[in-house]
Image (tube, rainbow, N blue to C red):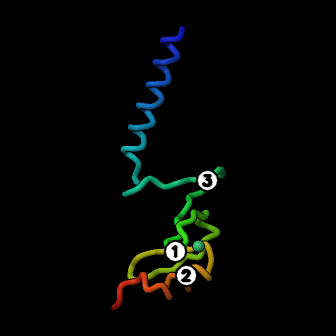
Amino acid sequence: MYRLILLLIIITIVYWLIKRAFSPKKGKAAKLDETGEELVQDPFCQCYIPKSQSYAVSLKNKKLFFCSEDCYKKYLESGALPKN
Ligand SMILES: [Zn+2]
């Protein structure tokens, strides 16, 4: 019985890994919060916020998500963005 449980756990892990490998999302696997919503990382304070509650900004064809407008301003002031 114990071996059967172990086998089931292994199958679950393998299935999860295969599912992950074929996931259409590129790059890092998206983090999800309890409600299953995608979490985005604030590049300034490094905290994670649900996408819908984030302060999203498009900069140089790159989408950035901040936890607040305040963080966005501080990020710009910090000179983290490349010039031009
Ligand atoms: Zn922040």
Q: Residue at x 40, y 53 (%)?
A: 24
- Tag shown at residue 44: 1
Q: Amino acid at mark 2?
A: Tyr
Mark 1 vs mark 3, foreground winner is 1
Mark 2 vs mark 3, foreground winner is 2
Could you tell me if the residues under marks 1 and 3 are in contact, i.e. CB atoms within 8 Å?
no
What element does badge 2 sit on? Answer: helix
The residue to which callout 2 is attached is 72
How far apart marks 2 and 1 lie (CA) works out to: 7 Å
Q: Which comes before the other along the chain, label 2 or label 1?
A: 1
Q: Is mark 1 within 8 Å of ligand 1?
A: yes
Mark 2 vs mark 1, foreground winner is 1
Q: Residues within 10 Å of mark 2 (few under 14, many from 20)?
A: many
Whether 45 is drawn above or below 77: the answer is above
How far apart marks 2 and 3 lie (CA) works out to: 22 Å
The residue to which callout 3 is attached is 33
| Residue 67, quarter of the rendered image | bottom right
* Residue furthest top as drawn: 1
Comparing 39 with 22, the one in front is 39
| Residue 55, quarter of the rendered image | bottom right
Point out residue 80 in the picture as x, y percentages from the top left corner: 42, 81
**Is 18 on the left or on the right of 46, as rendered?**
left
Could you tell me if the residues under marks 2 and 1 are in contact, i.e. CB atoms within 8 Å?
yes
How far apart marks 1 and 3 lie (CA) works out to: 20 Å
Point out residue 54 in the picture as x, y percentages from the top left corner: 60, 71
Q: Amino acid at mark 3?
A: Asp
What element does badge 1 sit on? Answer: loop
